[in-house]
Amino acid sequence: MSLSESHYAVIVVGGRPSGATLATRLAQGGLRVLLLDRATFPSLPAVSSPIIYACTMALLDEIGAPEAEYAHNTPKIRKLVSESRDYYRAIATIPEDRGRAYAYAIDRARFDHALWRHAANTHGVTALEGFGVTDLLWEGDRVIGVEGMRHGSRKAERFYADLIVGADGRWSLVARKVDAPLYNVDDSPTTSLYYAYWRNLQPYDLDEPLMVAHSTLDGLGYLIMDSADGTAAVVCEGHAETIERFSQGAGAPEALYEALLQNAPRVWARLQGAERVTSVRGLKHVPNYYRQPYGKGWALVGDAVHHKDPLGGQGVYDAVFSAKALAEQYLAHKRGQLDYESAMQGYKARLEEETLPVYYNTLAARANLAPSDPFQRLLGRYLVESPEVIEALARVPARMGDITQVMTTRHIVLSIAKGAARDVRRALTGELSPSAVPPLPIERAQGVQETNSYQQRLGCLGWLLALPAIMMFGGLAALRRK
């Protein structure tokens, strides 16, 4: 479609997942859309969680985005592992959802490029990469267009539309130009993270594609996710003040990242002989917020409208969901079914209904990065030894369950009671817990013995710690019955 016709129904500023899928949906609904991005594709975005579950893929199915392209040569992850140092671990199987029982740790450059191509090939979309928007155009208090330049050009170009959408990330130019107010902001305590992609990691004892979450229980958490072309994403996240302690004297980001990795012996062991194949990328003081999602002639989607800690791995889902919600509401307006204000109020309501519960749960989960005491470790082991709890927890990141349905007083008390009973039995029989963390293959080769029998045979100590809590709970229940 020719750029000489400079008026569109919608201009989307930003062509990564939220912008590309929004442009596709709007064009499939019959609108003429201009999709702009200052980058050229394929290229990496700013810091982003690469994990996607079936719920995200189902949204991409709706617009016909081919899984074979956006997940090309990317292994299907069917199991999630959560380790707490060498004290205990849990292994969860990703539940089936709409015919998929797996997740991907996608290559974001490949993923974003596939969605950009899909949008560009959709009738009604004009896609222009390498075009940096520098300003918005106004008519009174209403946004009516954008101004910018192509890479390598000094000539400003202007395009006009009924609606200008900022899909341009957490530092959104559109949001700044319209002065979109922030709300639901939470910045205490903030986290920071660093990551890179590696190749030829030492194998895990489970010989299949995995996402392994590892906590050192001292304020830092790690993720190792098998990704495209035989690579793995290796991420370290922690409270910003904890990260800053490691940064003293570390110098460049690469040195800081290496110091953080060395803090986790099991993670560092898997990197022996591995090759880092990307630069180290990071984000300090991860912001958590919502922005006012619309105004006169403008709207926001993706990280521009809502951003939260990547701890929960929900960033890509939130991006493509916000695109769907805005597209459906705005198309209803263009078809005369809703006036503009009602349509956009509906967009805001749908966005918050879908994302606010997960937002608050993610903020609460940051507490898990804090250093833990022995009783918290014991309780954690009791919880992960419960198959019902593990199955329920595996449903949470896939948006098939709510963490508040799992971490109830009933679940916790039952887990303590059953766990203490199992510890007594193990103390008598000498058996290990199923949550025991076995040595890595490389550790076995170096003669490391079975993991920390002291931690796995707490036995009577576990029982003595748990018994007062059980008695207190029983006493309170009896008082309530009276």
Image (spheres, rainbow, N blue to C red):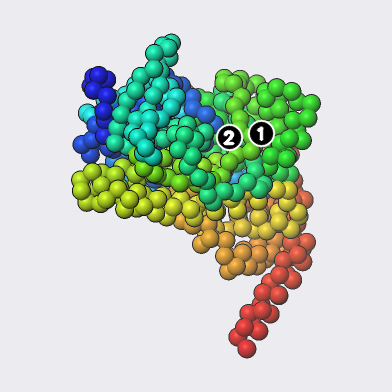
Percent of width and height locating residue 99: 34, 45
Q: Which mark is residue 417?
A: none
Residue at x 39%, y 40% (from the top left corner): 141
Q: Nearer the viewer, residue 37 or 292?
A: 292
Residue 464: quadrant of the picture: bottom right
Percent of width and height locating residue 479: 66, 84
Residue 6 is left or right of residue 419, and the answer is left
Q: Nearer the viewer, residue 5 or 249?
A: 5
- What's the amino acid at mark 1? Val
Query: Would you name the residue on which mark 2 appears?
Result: 224
Q: Is residue 293 visible?
A: yes
Residue 439: quadrant of the picture: top right
Q: State the CA–CA distance, disc 2 to disc 1.
A: 8 Å
Task: Give the quarter of the figure containing the N terminus.
Answer: top left
Residue at x 40%, y 50% (from the top left corner): 348
Percent of width and height locating residue 376: 71, 56
Local crowd size for mark 1, using a 10 Å CA cut-off: few (<14), some (14–19), many (≥20): many
Residue at x 34%, y 44% (from the top left corner): 326
Residue 109 is left or right of residue 68, and the answer is right
Q: Is residue 93 visible?
A: no
Local crowd size for mark 2, using a 10 Å CA cut-off: few (<14), some (14–19), many (≥20): many
- Please tell me whether residue 398 is drawn above or below residue 204 in the rendered image: below
Percent of width and height locating residue 342: 31, 53
Mark sitting earlier along the chain (2/1):
2
- Please tell me whether residue 371 is drawn above or below residue 26 in the rendered image: below
Q: Which mark is residue 267?
A: 1
Task: Give the quarter of the figure containing the C terminus.
Answer: bottom right
The answer to the question of whether label 2 and label 1 lie on touching residues, with beta carbons closer than 8 A, is: yes
Secondary structure under tag 2 reads strand
Residue at x 54%, y 38% (from the top left corner): 211
Secondary structure under tag 1 reads helix
